[in-house]
Amino acid sequence: MNELYTFAVELTFWLLIAFSIITWALILIKGVQNILASNRNRRFTRAFWSATDLNAAAALENHQGSAAQVAQVGFRTLRSADSSYGLDLEHSWDRQDLLERHLRQQIQKERRSLESGLAVLASIGTTAPFVGLFGTVFGIIEALTAITSNSSASIEVVAGPIGHALVATGFGIAVAIPSVLAYNYFLRRLKLIAADLDDFATDFVTLVQKAGFRIKPTAITTKLPSRNSENNTGTDKSTEVFA
């Protein structure tokens, strides 16, 4: 029976070690993710508001980050509405409603990406103390069993095993504290980034509204073969194709 109690205590410690490794790995990953997201959004919004007009802003396709993704979805929605308006149910919406719908969906998508891993941190922060307490219970049972077998209840006999059993509870609390702190911090960062995206989407809709919910097509110069190209006697002609 003592072997079972010992196994339960050891299992508790290994489980808490695994929780600790997962916690610090998530803290590192989420920290890098939040730093990159903030820097990318800052660079894109600076470039966006420095653009001369909406067409120049639409050409900012080399930027990354959640704000850039929201803007690109907005521009794609406007181009799609111009070319497919009324052809299907998706494009039968009012232009403003269609734009706001797609922007809202993209913001939710970016939010879900930033939320990844937070549920794990919350779960570890909630359960780690109880896992440690679970190990402590079995440790105390093992200690009391050992005390009974020694037929002695002196402080020297009791203090050692009981103190050893309480280590599991302390370990569980030590694992839970950074997990809870990290969860609260990253949740706060998530709310700030989501609020910034909402503000950016609102400003984007306002700008596009002034332009009549339309952006000018981009002229792309391409070369088309002449009619006599089959005989290799003609010359190529340049024409402009609007995308």
Image (cartoon, rainbow, N blue to C red):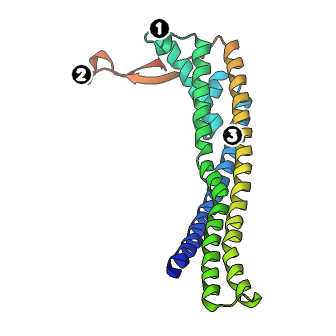
Residue sitting nearer the eye, 137 or 175: 137
- Which residue does the image show at 69% across and 51% down from the upper left? 183
Between tags 3 and 2, which lies in front?
3
Q: Is residue 82 left or right of residue 37?
A: left
Mark with earlier residue (1, 3): 3
Element class at badge 2: helix
The crowding category of the residue bearing disc 3, from other C-alpha atoms within 10 Å (few below 14, some 14 to 19, many at least 20), is many
Residue sitting nearer the eye, 118 or 241: 118
Give the farthest residue toward the top. Answer: 86
Element class at badge 1: loop
- Which residue does the image show at 62% across and 44% down from the upper left? 115
Element class at badge 3: helix
Tag 1 residue = 86
- Which residue does the image show at 26% across and 24% down from the upper left? 232
Q: Amino acid at mark 3?
A: Asn
| Number of numbered discs overlaid on the protein picture | 3
Q: Is residue 140 left or right of residue 4?
A: right
Tag 3 residue = 41
Residue 108 sits in quarter: top right
Per the model, the C-alpha gap separating discs 1 and 3 is: 34 Å
Q: Which mark is residue 230?
A: 2
Q: Amino acid at mark 2?
A: Glu
Residue sitting nearer the eye, 119 or 168: 168
Per the model, the C-alpha gap separating discs 1 and 2 is: 40 Å
- Which residue does the image show at 68% across and 23% down from the upper left? 204
Is label 3 in contact with label 2 (beta carbons under 8 Å)? no
Q: Amino acid at mark 1?
A: Gly
Regarding residue 195, the answer to whether it shows in the image is: yes
